Amino acid sequence: MPKKLFRKKMKFGIIFKIIMYILLLDFAFIYLYPFLHMIINSLKSSDDLMDISVKWVLNELCFDNFKLAFESLDYIPRFFKTLVSVGLCSVGHVLSCSFIGYGFARYNFRGKNIMFFLLMLSMVVPTQTIIVPLYILYSRMGMIPGQLGIILPTFFGFGLNGALFVFIFRQFFLSLPVALEEAAAIDGCGPIKTFFRIAFPIAKPTVIISSVLSVVWHWNDFFEPGLYIQKQKNFYLSMMLPTMATAVENAQANTPGMTAEVGYTDATIMAAVILVIAPIFIGYIFVQRKFVQSVETSGITGE
């Protein structure tokens, strides 16, 4: 290869890499900007909040915002209350949706295609459009007020995005060789035993995916808990944020950026948001490698 041609290719490769890195940094900044904005504002003092010239470089770091937010959220008891509810919802989704997905993948029965079509149709129906009949139903069943309206439906394949989890498990079980179930049947395993002893343990990648998604969605959900849980002492962490934000908004007319009663500021709200989402970030750091590997090996796109 001539040296001139080789040098041209080298220059083109370097220029291409530079352009790619610039584009990647631009896209990364779009996603990172809200988090950077939140972190910077959570460390602002009252003086910095009222100084419009202070944007990214702060005059002082005010960590008292996190202390006040921690106390205002009543963090420890509400954290464990939220964790228990989210954990139960995740377990319910994994158990019920895997069982339903296995049934759709392995068994033929009358009306199967219609039922699966209706299940997929429920994925595109917003929860807000059916919340009134759901509320009436749960109320008549004695699940409101309380957490049962959030937790119990997940054990029946319903709840927050339950249809999606059924679809994910169905796609995975379709990719499994039928010979596994046939071998289990020869050994004397019935359908239920085959599922729990053969199919479900193999579905570990899909279990990880569904668990992570269920935990994140339930942790961040505010709509359904806001309707079903009516007493403030039973509020989850995410449900406390509007309460603090309302206190700040109500005080803007008297003291811009601060409430004289409790000392909340916009920075306190940002600190509270960080404290609420911190467990999800920390948890994802530990499971992100397994989560990515599970997405690659789960066979979600298979048929």
Image (cartoon, rainbow, N blue to C red):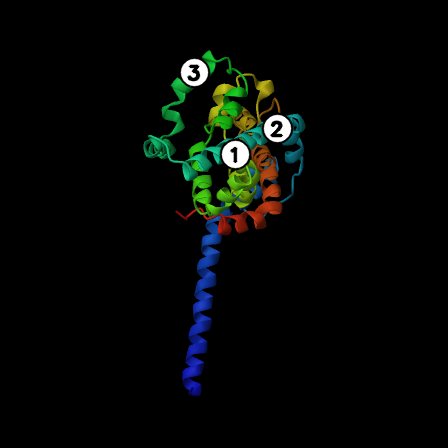
Q: Quadrant of residue 112?
A: top left
- Numbered disc in front, either 1 or 3: 1
The residue where tag 2 is placed is 84
- First along the sequence among labels 2 and 1: 2
Amino acid type at mark 1: Gly
Q: Is residue 300 left or right of residue 114?
A: right
Spatial distance from mark 2 to mark 3, Cα to Cα? 24 Å
Q: Secondary structure at mark 3?
A: helix
Q: Foreground: 68 or 91?
A: 91
Q: Nearer the viewer, residue 152 or 200?
A: 200
All told, the count of numbered labels is: 3
Relative to 66, residue 7 above or below: below
Relative image position of residue 6 (x, y in whole percent): 44, 82
Query: Is the Cβ of the residue at disc 1 closer than 8 Å to that at disc 3?
Result: no
Does the image show residue 117? yes
Dot 2 or dot 3, earlier in sequence: 2
**Residue linked to disc 3:** 137
| Mark 2: amino acid | Val
Q: Is residue 78 above or below residue 291?
A: above
Frontmost of labels 2 and 1 is 1
Assign a secondary structure to mark 2: helix
Across and down, in percent, residue 71 comes to 66, 28
Q: Evaluate if marks 2 and 3 touch, with contact meaning CB atoms under 8 Å apart.
A: no
Query: Which residue is identified by label 1?
Result: 190
Q: Amino acid at mark 3?
A: Leu
Sequence-wise, which precedes: disc 1 or disc 3?
3
Q: Residue furthest bottom?
A: 2
